[in-house]
Amino acid sequence: MKIKINLSLEKISIFLKKYHFFILGIVLFLLLSFNFFIYYKYVYVVMNINVDPVDDRIVVDEDILEKVIENINERKENLIRVKTENYYTPFNN
């Protein structure tokens, strides 16, 4: 059972002439739906929803904070060391 599909430019042209308003309507409906979704997600929800402030206290683990501060200080020291050290450059005679 073979199905033979025989499409030509003439058949496509006849189809588009017959259904162009219907196709255009579907495309416009899809575009309007997509635009409505974007407007709702990024404008309407952001403007109309009130967020209550959180009353929970923020807890910071001091050991992890110390490690982070040490890491930052090491990076600063390395940067200062690299900026002040004179390296040999083979391009300068």
Image (spheres, rainbow, N blue to C red):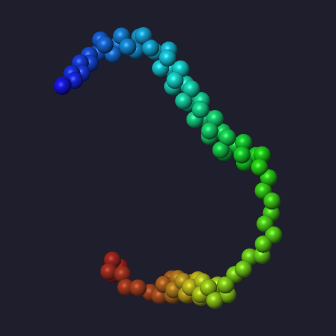
Q: Is residue 61 visible?
A: yes
Residue 67 placement, left or right of 19: right
* Residue plotted at (51% across, 25% down): 27
Q: Which one is in front, 70 or 57?
A: 57
Give coordinates of residue 75: x percent, y percent. 54, 83
Residue sticking out furthest to the front: 1
Q: Which one is in front, 85 or 2?
A: 2
Placement of 77 over or under 49, stated as above or below = below
Placement of 56 over or under 3, stated as above or below = below
* Residue plotted at (62% across, 38% down): 37
Residue 7 placement, left or right of 75: left
- Where residue 92 sits, quadrant-wise, is bottom left
Where the N terminus falls, by quadrant? top left
* Residue plotted at (72% across, 46% down): 45
Give coordinates of residue 6: x percent, y percent. 23, 18
* Residue plotted at (78% across, 66% down): 54
Q: Is residue 80 visible?
A: no
Q: Which one is in front, 48 or 89?
A: 48
- Where residue 72 sits, quadrant-wise, is bottom right
Where the C terminus falls, by quadrant? bottom left
Give coordinates of residue 53: x percent, y percent. 80, 63
Give coordinates of residue 41: x percent, y percent. 65, 44
Q: Which one is in front, 24 or 93?
A: 24
Placement of 61 over or under 50, stated as above or below = below
